[in-house]
Each structure stands twice: as structure tokens, then as C-alpha cells.
Amino acid sequence: MALKLIQRRPLLRQLGIQRYPPVVPLCSTRLLSSSPAAQPSCVACLCTSASRCIHKQGCLKLQPDSRVRSLATIVREPSFVASSSVGLHKDSVPRFRLTQLHRPTAAEEQAFQQRLENCSSSRQVFKLLRTVEIISDTMAAAALHRVADLEQDGNALKDPAVLQNDTITALCSQLEQDSGRLTDAGLVSALLACTRLFLDPWSTLMVRLVSESQERLDGRHMSVGQLCSLGQAMLAMEGRGSVMLDEVMEQIQKQEPAQWSLADLQAVYQLLQSGVGVDGKYRDLLNAMHTHAVTVTYRMNPAAVSGLLSALVTLKQTQAMPLVISLCKQAVRHIPHFTDDELSLVLVALMHFGHSDHYFVEAMERYVPKMAFTSHPETVTKVMQFFSRRNILSPVVFDAVAESFVYRADDYSTSQVARQIVPFGKLGYVPPNAGDLFRKVESILRTRFSHFQPRMLLNLLHACILVERFPVNFVSKVFSSFFLQQLEDGGTKIDRVVLAQLTQLYMTLKLECPFYEGPRLLSKYRIKSFLTSGHTVESPVDVHLYHSVKSGLVDLLGARSYFGSRVLTPYCYTLDVEIKLDEEGYVLPASHEDDVYKRIAICIDGPKRFSTNKRQLLGKEAIKHRHLRLLGYEVVQIPFYEMEKLRNRTSVVEYLHQKIFPHSYRLSW
């Protein structure tokens, strides 16, 4: 056999893999033989003479050479565990035979797969295998995959001893012996399953499966799905530098994506997502796949939709927005049928690409009230993060989550608590059960304050003040030097967003909680402008809307000098427009500082200062208006939706006059 694994040849000879391992005793469970001849007496070596097989000592013809080094001495790769049970085992039960003749029917294989999926433990999988009379190589591989599904825990198995089970060792032993007779699908699936079970890459079983896969790969007859399974296995064993993986991708690129089945398309996306397609590799292949995927999204099931969206996120395919939009439309149909994990992946992807439509929102509004009390806490959290990130205010969703929070929050992590409450503050929404909701928040803070990460805790407290819920009992701890040092991650300076939140928290206590007598925020942690600290605390003015208002004010007041623009106050807020009046109500020049009796703060609120679906100010804008009034300003709001109704310059001037000077006559200049 001519193989490209030249480097492995010395080790193969050293391990003696050309020798067959000893046989194991027969059991009632059987796998069909591919030999056209009559059934041999020894199914391990296919001997024709029963006298040459001794079950107690194994097949005499195939006894291991005492000079051959044991697999247990092989140096293992860090991410795998060696399984000495795979390969040479005598007296293990049950006994399997893998073959291609008289394969189970498609219905039988499907029924077996369904029974596998119903298994909730490896013990049940082994019990199922012992009850099956006929099993194919693909069914055997599926059983190994199910064990991996149940036992995987990160980069290791929950219970490595599961590999010592008689059933799995017998199954792996037969895969090792019959590697040359496996179908392409069974071969690559078994190899992938073994990598998922973290078997030693240099064990006899793994080397034989890889060697046989290399020969099949050289034959160039593998399907796209089989190539992807082989690619996943080699990626797990050898990483992105694998020579066989490069050959797999070379053959995949020669295929035409438009001719692929939906399963093949998903398999290639998954392979690329696993690490093969990072750093912009295979861009042309991806673009061709995106073009084809758009045409078949209407046939995708929930798992396919969520998996493909997740792949697009991992591969950073920002240019694939037509596909994202198409997948979002298909997701609307599947929302009631997504698992918690699948729905989380969909929401993360839509947040990543900044996309949503009203059909998706309406579907979520129908579904969330049903799932808020039963779904995984992280899924409920992702729902709130999605609506928050997209600035979508849905009372139906927020009310349902607020109710479930009161009953379930004790079981939430501190991160989940904070991430579910922050959207209420960001969108400035107070649910009907606000009293119960924030009492629960206060209870959690009281009992688990030290469990919160500093940044997460600050986000939570800041969200509370946006909806006029003042965490007076906990601010003293936040302003302590110990907490502030924790915010200085690794000794670096605190970023300006955090400083802005601290400053606004301090201002809120000064303006709205005058009875507070706890520690003050040190001046070195205060900033002078919220606007220059990102857009977390204050939003910049909409430029187009500002110019429309400015032109109207010039006509209204008679000159540009009678109002100031983008005025930074001593209280960190930036005024879009400021007008000064004297005691008699006359407008003073903007540069005038003496005899100022009244200051008018004009807030030119563009679309980005509101939720996207309702005419409600975001929390950060509402608190700005509130604080400016407390500081003595007369706040005049100019919302975009009122300006949009004005058709000409004259109507703009009349509108501004009514808004700013509702009780005075306008003079014509």
C-alpha cells in the first residue's frame, strides 16, 4: 500500500501493525462478513480451519510478537488520552464483526439512530449495542459518536474509564481489524468519533484508520460530506498544518458548490468554522457557498439555520449580508422549534451582524412569554441582550422576563443577573412589577455583592439609576478605594467609559439623593465630559437634524450669535443648543456671562436617541433631561419625528417659536 504518511512508516513497523491483534471470544451480537466464502471459524483472522484458532490464547496465527513494543509506551499528544483497551484484548465481550454484505436497511439504520439519540448515558448505549443482532460500520461509528456526545467535557472525557467497557473495546477492536473493509462513510465517521473520544493518535486503531483514509483520499472518490468528516478528524489530530487536511481542502475546492446537497453545504461550513477557514482563507470558495446557500435557506431546519449563522460569525463573513437576511427570514419560522442553544446562536449572530426585522421581533414577542420561565437562563439573557443591542423596546418581552426574573434569579449567575437588568436601564423601561423586580435585585446584591465582577456590577448599578432606582446602600462600596483598584485591571488606567459611569453615578447621588452621606467619588475618577467618553452615557447630536434646527433658530432669533452650539456644561453634559435669557426674558448673546437669569437647553433628539420601534427616549437621554432640569435648565425637546412633519423653512421657524417661546409673540426681523 503506497501511503503518503512517510514519517509514520518506521513507527508502523515498530508497532507491528501488519500483525493482527489476538481475537476475542464470540458473543451473540454479530456483524455481517464481507467474505463471499462460507463463514470462517475465527472471525478475527478469517481463518478457514477451526483447528488453528484457540479462543483461550487467541489465534495462534496472529499472536503478538513479544518483540513488538506495546501501545501503552507511545508518547501521547496533550489533548488525547491513550486507550490500551483499543486493539489487543482477549476474552472481551461482546464480539462484533463489521462487513458490507447484507447491510441493515435504511429504515433499520434510522431506527437504530433514533434509539441512540434516546440514550441518556453511555451505559444505555452499551446496552443498546448488546441487543442489536445486525450492525453496519456506520451504525458502529454512530454509537461511538453518541458516547462522545454524552462523555465529552471540554478537551477531555468526563469518565475516561468508559473506554475500558467491554462493548466499546470489542467494537474498536473490530474496527481496527476490518479497517480495509469499511465503507468510506463508515471509515471517516469512525475516525472522527475516535478523535472525539480522545484516543491516542498513535494507537494501532488510529494509525490503521488514518492509513486507510489516506489510501481512500488518494483514490479521489470520497463525497464532499466524507471529505469534511476526514478533514475534521485530521484537524483534531494534527491541527491546521495537516498535510491530509490540505489535500482534503484541495479536493473540496475542485467541487462546484452549486451542485452540493444541503448536508454537504453544512458540512463544509462546519469544517471551515472549525479553524480551517480563518484568516480569510478560501474566500472564493466561501463566496460561492454563500451564493448557493441563499437559494436553499428555505429548506433549512432549525439546526441548519443556527449552525450556518454561527459559522458566518466565526468566519467574519460581513460581506454575506444577503445570506444573513435570508437566514433571519427562515429563522422566523423556526423560533418555536429552536433548542435553547440554537436560539442563542441565532441571537448572537443577529447581534454580530446588526440585523433584525419586525417579523423576527413579532415572532419573539409571541415566543418569549412561553419560554421565559422554562428556558435556560443564558438563553433568556441572550434574548434581553438582543433587544438591548438592537434598541428594540418590547413591553411584552420585557414584562415576561421581569416576571420570570423575580422567581428564577436566585439560580442565575451574577453575570446573568446583570445582563438581564441592564437592558431595562438602557431602554429606559420600567415594567409593571418594578417593585418586585428591583427588590429581588437588591436582595441579590445584598447576598452576593462580592461575587460580581467589578465591571458587571458597575453596569448593573448604572442601569438602575437610568430608571430612577437608586442603589444608595451599595454605592459606598463602589466608591471605596478597594473596588476602584479592582476596576484598574492589571494596574492599567480605568477606561473612560467606566469613569463616565462612575461620574454619572456620583452626580445622580448628589442631585437625586441629597440625603446620601457616604463616601464621595475621588476627583481623579471623575471626568469633565460625557460626550468624549464614548457614546455609552451621552449621544452626539444628529448632524442633519442639527443643521435644520440651526437654520430655523437664526431666522427666529435674528442672528447666529444669540445661541450657542455643543456647549459643555460644568456638569459633564453637552448641550446641543443653549439660549440665555435675562430677567425680563430677552435673549442674550451666547458669549454673555453676566446677568443671565435663565438658560434654555434645547435637546435635538434624533432617531438614535430613541428606541428603534417606539418613540421613547433611551435611558441615557432620559436621565440627561432629568439632570438638566434639576440643575436649573429649562429643557426643550426637539424630537426628529416632529421636525420630519415640517415641509418648509417658515414652518420650522413657527414650530421652534412655539416650542421655545410658547407665551411670547414673534417679531419679524
Image (cartoon, helix red, strand yellow):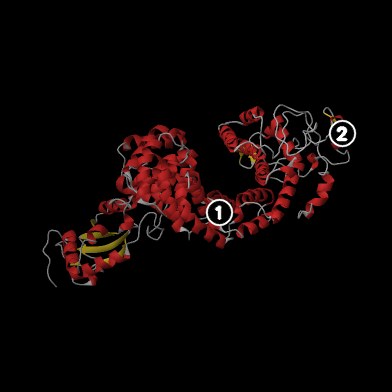
Residue 27 visible somewhere in the drawing: yes
- Which of 656/385 is in front? 385
Q: Say whether residue 519 is left or right of residue 264.
A: left
Counting residues from the N terminus, which is met first, the one under dot 2 or under dot 1? 2
Q: Say whether residue 595 is left or right of residue 41.
A: left
Which residue is the extreme one toward the right? 67
The amino acid type, in three-letter code, at marker 1 is: Trp
Q: Which quadrant holds residue 277?
A: bottom right
Secondary structure under badge 1? loop
- Numbered label attached to residue 260: 1
Secondary structure under badge 2? helix
Report the label total. Answer: 2
Residue 4 image offset from top left, x and y in percent: 76, 55
| Residue at image location 30% in from the left, 66% down from the top | 544
Q: Which quadrant holds residue 381?
A: top left
- Numbered label attached to residue 450: none
The amino acid type, in three-letter code, at marker 2 is: Leu
Q: Quadrant of the C terminus?
A: bottom left
Residue that label 2 marks: 60
- Which of 388/333 is in front? 333
Residue 419 visible somewhere in the drawing: no
Can you say whether 98 is above or below 611 in the image? above
Q: CA distance from mark 2 to mark 1?
A: 49 Å
| Residue at image location 81% in from the left, 34% down from the top | 22
Residue 314 image offset from top left, x and y in percent: 53, 53
- Which of 120/430 is in front? 120
Q: Give neighbour class at mark 2: few <14, some 14-19, many 20+ (Cα, 10 Å).
A: some
Residue 307 image offset from top left, x and y in percent: 51, 48
